[in-house]
């Protein structure tokens, strides 16, 4: 019988379907065991959330920690944050166990509204206090509660950069002052905005300065990823050519989500032998499917911004965007255009800025969009 599609494109499905990240997982486990908080950073879709789930899976198997995951991507203020934290703890502690019962009685004292998340069906709480102080106090009691648990706690706050957009400006100071007193709780702060997270954690004037260890998540090593793909194909009696594997890694630049997407499609195609031509076809199909979306992006950008985006896509990585050769080659015009253009493309997350051994560079954020733009005349 044919196995399920082993190339997952959302969430986490256990260690079998998770490629590598051995070192990173050990770092997170060691940090948790040694009282070190971690700031986990990468561009989007590289695998931060997956790595957190993978680490939790290990820790849950060994039973050493209580693991709590809170995604604050959709939060806009202190109140949302408190709700998410309360809900995350509620989900992590089984209702019938003593810790779950104790948490329930704490929660009831805070009089939240209990409900179920419309999408996931998971339980959630929502607090309705009159003042900011009450939210702050509630966060404090949630942390106190975690700190009083018998078992050590590992709390991951995903998309942490979100707190910089809250209207409450003391959020960092508030969290820092509470977190630094915790003895039984370690944290993972995860996020994709390198710029915002560096500001929070490496600016000497800010509350979280030098309080965590940085972990930068890069691409999975190509040979390891190729082996992973081959193993799963072979297990399902699918033969994949070496050039096909190389093409997948080149096209996706080993950016996890895109590599997974291509492999997921190849697996779903039902082919018993995957050649390089089959891969090229699948990649083209994916770009075609996204085309409508990409054309909508064009409406959201000015012609100059679109032109810059296309230029960056065609170059792959742009190290010197203000260089005359680059401006002239792509007819970008006066240097002020490029400065303004880069800023607004960064803000819209159409491009990202990263470092490699040659220095800082700009790339188009969405790999499929980048590949599609490259093909434009
Ligand atoms: N090591 C891995 N092996 C296989 N698939 C992975 C791995 N890491 C992440 N993924 C998959 O890649 C996609 C992007 O990963 P995700 O963890 O959501 O990235 P991020 O949190 O950095 O935006 C998800 O669909 C996830 O299931
Ligand atoms: Mg994520």
Image (cartoon, rainbow, N blue to C red):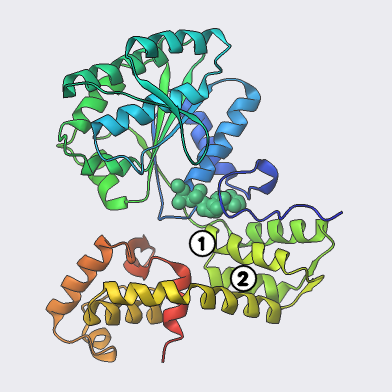
Label number found at residue 248: 2
Judged from this view, the residue extending furthest toward the right is 1
Image quarter of residue 169: top left
289 or 229: nearer the viewer = 289
What x and y, as percent, mark residue 43?
40, 55
Q: Report the side of 102 relative to 3 (left or right).
A: left
What x and y, as percent, mark residue 268?
71, 64
Which residue is rendered at x = 27% and y = 72% of the image? 300
Image quarter of residue 13: top right
Which residue is rendered at x = 46% and y = 79% of the image? 372
Q: Secondary structure at mark 1?
A: loop
Which residue is rendered at x = 46% and y = 69% of the image? 367
Q: Is mark 1 within 8 Å of ligand 1?
A: no
What x and y, as percent, mark residue 71?
41, 38
Is residue 34 visible in the rendered image? The answer is: no
346 or 3: nearer the viewer = 3
Q: Mark 1 touching mark 2, by CB under 8 A? A: no
User: Which comes before the other along the chain, label 1 or label 2?
Assistant: 2
What x and y, as percent, mark residue 82?
31, 27
Is residue 160 visible in the rendered image? The answer is: yes
Quadrant for the C terminus in the image: bottom left
User: Badge 1, how many Cα within 10 Å: few under 14, some, many 20+?
Assistant: many
Q: Which residue is mark 1?
A: 255
Please tell me whether residue 73 is drawn above or below residue 185 in the rendered image.
Answer: below
User: Badge 2, how many Cα within 10 Å: few under 14, some, many 20+?
Assistant: many
Please tell me whether residue 59 is drawn above or below residue 100 in the rendered image.
Answer: below
Which residue is rendered at x = 21% and y = 73% of the image? 341
Q: Report the side of 338 relative to 291 (left or right).
A: left
């Amino acid at each position: 019988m044919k196995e399920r599609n082993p190339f997952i494109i959302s969430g986490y499905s256990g260690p079998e379907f998770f490629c590598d990240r051995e070192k990173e997982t050990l770092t997170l486990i060691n940090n948790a065991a040694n009282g070190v908080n971690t700031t986990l950073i990468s561009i989007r879709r590289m695998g931060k959330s997956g790595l957190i789930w993978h680490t939790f899976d290990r820790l849950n198997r060994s039973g050493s920690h209580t693991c709590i995951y809170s995604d604050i991507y959709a939060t806009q203020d202190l109140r949302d944050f408190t709700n998410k934290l309360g809900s995350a703890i509620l989900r992590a502690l089984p209702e019938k166990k003593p810790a779950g019962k104790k948490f329930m009685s704490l929660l009831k004292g805070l009089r939240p509204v209990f409900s179920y998340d419309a999408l996931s069906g998971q339980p959630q709480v929502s607090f309705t206090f009159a003042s900011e102080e009450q939210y702050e106090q509630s966060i404090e009691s949630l942390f106190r509660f975690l700190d009083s648990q018998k078992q050590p706690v590992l709390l991951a706050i995903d998309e942490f950069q979100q707190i910089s957009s809250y209207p409450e400006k003391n959020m960092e100071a508030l969290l820092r002052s509470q977190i630094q007193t915790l003895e039984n709780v370690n944290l993972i702060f995860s996020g994709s905005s390198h710029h915002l997270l560096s500001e929070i954690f490496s600016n000497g004037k800010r509350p979280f300065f030098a309080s965590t260890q940085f972990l930068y998540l890069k691409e999975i090593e190509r040979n390891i990823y190729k082996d992973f793909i081959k193993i799963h194909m072979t297990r399902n009696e699918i033969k994949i050519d070496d050039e096909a594997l190389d093409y997948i890694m080149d096209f996706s630049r080993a950016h996890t989500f895109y590599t997974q997407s291509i492999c997921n499609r190849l697996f779903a195609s039902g082919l018993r032998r995957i050649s390089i031509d089959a891969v090229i076809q699948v990649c083209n199909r994916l770009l075609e499917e996204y085309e409508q979306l990409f054309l909508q992006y064009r409406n959201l950008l000015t012609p100059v911004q679109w032109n810059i985006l296309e230029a960056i896509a065609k170059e792959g990585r742009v190290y010197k965007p203000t260089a005359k050769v680059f401006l002239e080659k792509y007819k970008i015009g006066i240097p002020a255009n490029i400065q303004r253009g880069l800023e607004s493309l960064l803000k819209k997350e159409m491009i990202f800025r990263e470092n490699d051994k040659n220095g800082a560079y700009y790339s188009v954020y969405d790999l499929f969009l980048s590949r599609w733009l490259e093909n434009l005349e």
